[in-house]
Amino acid sequence: MSVDEAVVRLSAQRYWLSATVAPAGNRLLYVRLFATRTPR
């Protein structure tokens, strides 16, 4: 599994896109868009 996070800007607002991908077949397992980011 691979997990990635990216910042998306829409109308001058920032959102965080989080996605988990299965390596076999590159299938998306989980995708979520957050308005705020929680520190790890």
Image: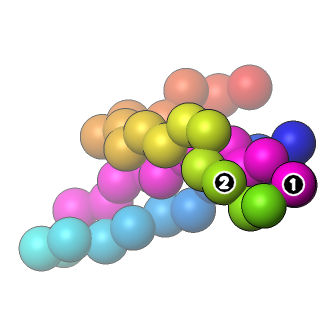
Q: Is residue 3 left or right of residue 10?
A: right
Q: CA distance from mark 1 to mark 2?
A: 7 Å
Proximity of marks 1 and 2: CB atoms separated by less than 8 Å? yes
Magenta-colored stretch includes residue 16: yes
Q: Does residue 22 appear to the left or right of 8 in the view shown?
A: right
* Residue range of the region highlighted in magenta in the rendering: 13-24
* Residue positioned 35% across, 53% down in the render: 15
Disc tally is 2
Q: Which residue is mark 2?
A: 27
Which numbered circle lies on residue 16? none
Q: Quadrant of residue 25?
A: bottom right
> Which residue appears at 72% of the width and 50% of the height?
21
Question: Which residue occupies the extreme front position in the image?
Answer: 25
Secondary structure under the numbered disc 2 in the rendered image: strand
The residue at which mark 1 appears reads as 24
Q: Residue at x 55, y 27 (%)?
A: 38
- Circle 1 residues within 10 Å: few <14, some 14–19, many ≥20: few
Position of the C terminus by quadrant: top right
Query: Which quarter of the rendering shows the N terminus?
Result: top right
User: Residue 17: within the magenta?
Assistant: yes
> In front: 30, or 10?
30
Work out whether 8 lies above or below 19: below
